[in-house]
Amino acid sequence: MLKDITLGQFFPGRSVLHRSDPRMKIILTMLYIIVVFLSESTVAYLVTVAFTLGLAIISRINVRVILKGLKPLLFIMIFTAFFNIFWTKGESEPLLQYGVIKIYKEGIIFAVKMIVRVACVLTGSSVILTYTTSPIALTDGLERLLSPLKKIKLPVHEFSMMMTIALRFIPTLIEETDKIMNAQKARGADFSSGGLIKRTKALLPVLIPLFASSFRRAGELATAMECRCYRGDKGRTRMTQLKYKPVDFVLLTVMVIYGAGVILSNIYLGQLLAI
Amino acid sequence: MNALELKDITFTYSKKTPFESTALSGVSAFFEEKKVNGLIGHTGSGKSTLVQMMNGLLKPDEGTVLLMGKDIWEEPKKIRQVRFRCGLVFQYPEYQLFEDTCEKDIAFGPRNMGLSDEEIRERVKSAAEFVGLDSSLLKKSPFELSGGQKRRVALAGVMAMEPSVLVLDEPAAGLDPIGRTEIFGGIRGYQRAKGNTVIIVSHSMEDVAEYCDNLTVLKNGRVLLKGSTGEVFMHEKELIESGLGVPQITRFVRLLREEGIDLPENIYTVEEALREVKRLLGERRGDNA
């Protein structure tokens, strides 16, 4: 059923990462992605894997959830790794040779590294940001981070308000779609048989009421917002003020140390554990 | 004979996820043929889930649903046929309208049944009459109508399929008193003319008292009470405990009886009360004379 789709991927909790400021988490995610892509040497990779696992552990997100998050990209990962294995040419003798197919040690190492890198980036960024930050906090953080752009007349507040409203209404729309589909099924609508054209046509009785009610909702929301004197960003204050707390700086420090560790191990430990 | 019978129905939403919630735990209920059956229960008692079991929109985890004595899930591929025989009108059905004219919208169900054009026209006309929809409105777009008129179009859309069991989930929710009377009047007229079975789900004790022959009371996914409207309303204490109640007039009459006024116990509608009070006053005047 439509209801079963988890949206926003947010899992409420009380971990350090949950409590951290959304602005800091956005910055940390960007830093983290940069550092992961800077990892070159084997030691740097090991540091990255250890750091990512550490993040996953402190986030207290269920392992199954994280693995499920990796699943959709599994195919692409394997697919690219597969091509890397066959297409990378090494200097040493090929490990395996069968006709035109030659597999080099470098190819395998490259493929493994690539898989590790993608898996790390995915796990890390979702653990720091999407799994532990509510969509509302996320847009709020984004608005505050981008607020300097207001100086050059970019409607940052309006964009983030639009995003917040869109996120807020996704579950409502799903519920509504479910209801309308059931109502039409009760009148004998058939969504699951026939060819492409027939099926698309069958969706009209769902889409038209859905659009109609979206317009109605939008109108109602606009009225409700005006009743509460909403007039955009001008003179707007906030109930929840974002404030950096000690925990944010601790996380930032840890991230910087991790970055330094990766860079240093690239430079000085490049040969250590070299395969 | 029972038009619809549910046996030991169990249903859980979002199974095997953190959001798992049991809606029905072993519900058995039956709805009598050619009667107006009431189904009442507080919010979250499982009414809406049960209603969706009746025409196979939801499949019970355990238990069977018998429509005219036949298991509806016997042939899962033919579940659409079940929906034509057990018509379901959802809460606030006016939001399901989509065609450019009311006429076409009412014809949506019958058209899905594969009826002939002539038959469809006939059914649309008669369904519109039952719900008291003026024929001049049939050519209009449903989006131009008032809320109450839209509700009638939606109701007619299901009635036009002429199901042997008509299930209505809160058909009068959000309507004004006149709208309520008219909607229920239409449903009753339809039931009498077609001689089919009607199941009304409602929160309003006044409405079920007036229009239903028997009642089933649902509480926390189980059947609490079952019987004729009169029998069920004798259990005022249980009804109040399950977040419901009895019609205000029934309560009023009970209080009057406790004060020693000689009124019968089984009064559920204002009309009945009025008649009895008039009779009583007539008797007294007679005594005085």
Image (tube, coloured by chain):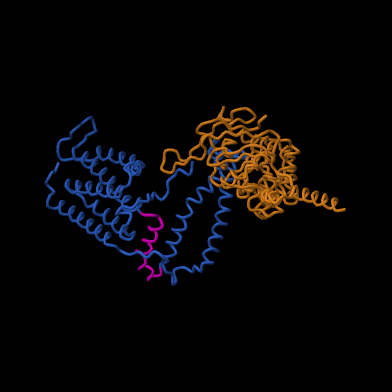
Chain colours: A blue, B orange
Picture coordinates of residue B186 (x, y %)? 73, 45
Image quarter in which the N terminus of chain B is found: top right
Q: Quadrant of residue B75?
A: top right
Residue farthest toward the bottom in the current orientation of the protein = A235
Q: Position of residue B275 (x, y in %)?
A: 78, 48
- Which quadrant of the structure image shows residue B233? top right
Q: Nearer the viewer, residue B223 or B35?
A: B223
Measured along the vertical axis of the image, is residue B282 above or below residue A106? below
A69 relative position to A190: left or right: left
As drawn, the residue found furthest toward the right would be: B289
Residue toward you, B138 or B220? B220
Question: Does A144 lie within the magenta span?
Answer: yes
From the viewer's perspective, is A79 left or right of B26?
left
Q: Is residue B121 magenta?
A: no
Please state the extent of the stretch shown in magenta in the rendering.
A133-153
- Magenta span dominant secondary structure: helix
Residue B133 is situated, as x and y percent measured from the top left of the image, at 73, 49
Residue at 42% x, 38% y is B16
Question: How many discs appear?
Answer: 0
Where residue B177 sits in the image (x, y, percent)? 70, 54
- Residue A135 is at least partly visible in this image: yes
Nearer to us in this view, B216 or A93:
B216
Residue B110 in sight: no
